[in-house]
């Protein structure tokens, strides 16, 4: 009797492997990325990695970080913030300084700009979702503003790939959920725009948000991978340039620093374009003051009994405001 030869894969018959694969797809396999669901909710991508996945643990973590800061530093109306986006164990204590300044303030909408870590972009990708989800609940997206930006022109688009695994926007949300009430967001992932395009992007956003009660956030870490000592020097200089509130000077500062050939330094602001765009918008909205709230780097944090100072990442919290 003729018998068909069985083909094996990974130690199992190919038919079995194929059936298992199709079954996984049908029940929402982890092979799929956390994509846009039917209700258009952007699901958490880094919960359990960059910050706690358990809601109670996350709530306690954020509240504890903020409660350690007893006084605010800014006397005026805050229009924008720069906040880091690394894991909370490394940068959360710095981000807390930014969010402590706006705790309890009545902002209606938060426009969050962050860099694209996973997709090449030109211009700005505006998150065309109904909401962003975190372990603390859903944060609604301002559909009116998102739709208006997507209708502006070619500098604004929506790339699902740019948002789906991006942590720069997501890591800001649990802090916002603990310090603000009744707010929505406009999530924007920035691409590799030259200064002239950043001006166009910023002007378009300002035209839409002027007169509204809005907070701008630039999600950015600082120097990447120099030694602890070099990071302190580089980042302090970058913060001093940010204090000038001169977007063009900030934009050009990174190239000048990188030309110095500092060992292992790959960037001075990974969210450079987010920071520059927020500075541009703040100035257009009447902001004329800057306060550096806190600086630290990963070498200041003990991890598994050791402070790694050979290759570090810098973190800064900055407020842009109108006195």
Image (spheres, grey):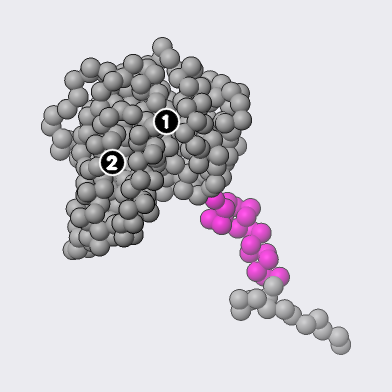
Near mark 2 (Cα within 10 A), the count class, few <14, some 14-19 or many ≥20, is many
Which of the 4 quarters of the picture holds residue 221? top left
- Residue 14 seen by the camera: yes
Prevalent SS, magenta region:
helix
Residue that appears at 31% across and 19% down: 287
The disc label shown at residue 277, or none: 1
The residue stretch that appears in magenta: 15-34
Residue 154 relative to residue 65: left or right: right
Q: Return the residue nearer the eye: 264 or 128.
A: 264
Does 123 sit above or below residue 256?
above
Residue that appears at 25% across and 62% down: 310
Q: Return the residue nearer the eye: 115 or 135.
A: 115
Does 74 sit above or below residue 67?
above
Magenta stretch encompasses residue 28: yes
Q: Position of residue 186 (x, y in %)?
A: 46, 28
Residue at the left extreme, as displayed: 70
Q: Where is residue 292 in the image (x, y as percent from the top left)?
A: 22, 34
Q: Mark 2 points at which residue?
A: 238
Which of the 4 quarters of the picture holds residue 121? top right
């Amino acid at each position: 009797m003729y018998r068909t030869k069985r083909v094996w894969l990974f130690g199992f018959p190919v038919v079995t492997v194929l059936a298992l694969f199709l079954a996984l797809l049908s029940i929402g396999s982890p092979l799929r990325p956390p994509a846009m669901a039917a209700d258009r909710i952007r699901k958490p991508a880094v919960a359990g990695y960059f910050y706690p996945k358990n809601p109670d643990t996350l709530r306690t973590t954020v509240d504890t970080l903020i409660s350690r800061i007893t006084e605010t530093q800014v006397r005026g109306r805050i229009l924008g913030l720069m906040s880091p986006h690394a894991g909370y164990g490394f940068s959360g204590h710095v981000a807390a300084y930014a969010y402590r300044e706006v705790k309890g303030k009545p902002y209606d909408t938060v426009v969050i700009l962050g860099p694209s870590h996973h997709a090449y972009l030109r211009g700005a990708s505006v998150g065309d979702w109904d909401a962003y989800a975190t372990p603390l609940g859903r944060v609604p997206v301002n559909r009116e503003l998102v739709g208006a930006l997507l209708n502006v022109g070619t500098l604004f688009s929506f790339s699902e790939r740019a948002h789906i695994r991006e942590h720069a926007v997501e890591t800001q949300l649990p802090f916002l959920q603990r310090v603000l009430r009744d707010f929505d967001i406009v999530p924007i992932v920035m691409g590799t725009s030259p200064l002239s395009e950043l001006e166009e992007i910023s002007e378009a956003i300002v035209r839409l948000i002027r007169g509204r009660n809005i907070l701008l956030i630039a999600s950015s870490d600082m120097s990447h991978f120099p030694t602890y000592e070099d990071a302190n020097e580089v980042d302090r200089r970058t913060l001093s340039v940010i204090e000038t509130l001169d977007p063009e000077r900030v934009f050009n500062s990174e190239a000048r620093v990188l030309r110095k050939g500092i060992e292992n330094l790959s960037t001075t602001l990974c969210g450079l374009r987010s920071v520059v765009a927020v500075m541009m918008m703040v100035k257009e909205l009447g902001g004329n003051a800057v306060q550096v709230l806190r600086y630290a780097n990963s070498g200041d944090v003990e991890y598994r009994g050791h402070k790694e100072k050979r290759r570090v990442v810098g973190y800064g919290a900055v407020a842009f405001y109108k006195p």
